[in-house]
Amino acid sequence: MTTGLRIHNVSMFYDEGRNRISILDKISLTVKPGEFIAVVGPSGSGKSTFLSVAGALLKSSEGEITLNGHPFSTLSDSELSSIRLKEIGFILQSSNLVPYLNVLDQLLVIKKMSGKIKAEDKAYAIKLLEDLGLREKLNSFPEELSGGEKQRTAIARALMGKPSVILADEPTASLDTPRAHEVVNLIANQVKTRGIAAVMVTHDERMLDYCDKVYHMEDGKLLLAE
């Protein structure tokens, strides 16, 4: 079985009267376990739509997306929902932490969504937070965290389900340069250590040295950068 994320000839378009508006144009991309890919490009180039399609949040108009050998087109809505919960970890430009949950519970809520929280789940969450330098923040609430700590918590939450792929949408947008490097370095290290396929959409060219490959998107087309 092919592992990792495979996107093959994916297009996204909609019809407006007699005109067809193209958002993604025959995109192909393979991301192997342990590989960290960046996608850069101007606003409106299709990057966010690309990430939504890759994360099974939107269905493509044409083409196929396969995760660990499972084509999205063959899955029901409930199966796609399960894929999003168990196989895909999302990291957004805003950490999107739940304001009334402490740092540990931000992670445990992921397990609660898919069933019962077990003792080993709590132990795994604590270990994740320790690995990301948040051992002293387990009982802290989002309002008590710095911007970098919030994003580290979001990274830990994305890893909580032991996903096959991480999709990061502008994860450094609200961070200063030192915190931005800290966060992307953490993502890169976790991708390598845990053997996760990862795609980061970004405007932030300071972060590209952490990535294995860089792709450029413009007008819905995706090309490997020189």
Image (cartoon, helix red, strand yellow):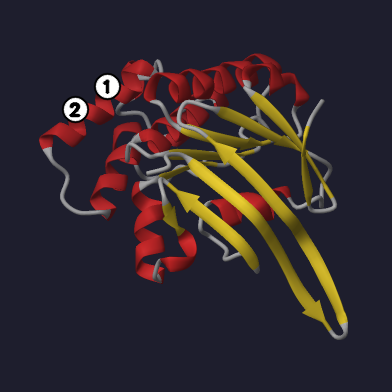
Residue 168 image offset from top left, x and y in percent? 57, 38
Q: Residues within 10 Å of mark 2 (few under 14, many from 20)?
A: few
Report helix, strand or loop for mark 2.
helix
Q: Which mark is residue 127?
A: 1
Task: Decide if residue 126 is on the left or right side of residue 40.
Answer: left
- Cα distance between the residues tagged 2 and 1: 6 Å
Q: Cβ–Cβ below 8 Å for labels 2 and 1?
A: yes
Label at residue 123: 2
Q: Nearer the viewer, residue 141 or 36?
A: 36
What kind of residue is marked 2?
Answer: Ala
Q: Position of residue 194 (x, y in %)?
A: 38, 24
Residue at x 63% of width, y 22% of height: 211
Query: Under tag 1, what secondary structure?
Result: helix
Which residue ends up furthest to the left in the rendered image? 119
Q: Is residue 226 visible?
A: yes
Expressed as whole percent of the image width and height from the top left, the position of residue 103 reads: 35, 32
Residue beneath the point at 42% across and 38% down: 158
Towards the viewer: 184 or 70: 70
Question: What is the quadrant of the C terminus in the image?
Answer: top right
Left or right for 159, reference 211: left
Q: Name which residue type carries label 1.
A: Lys
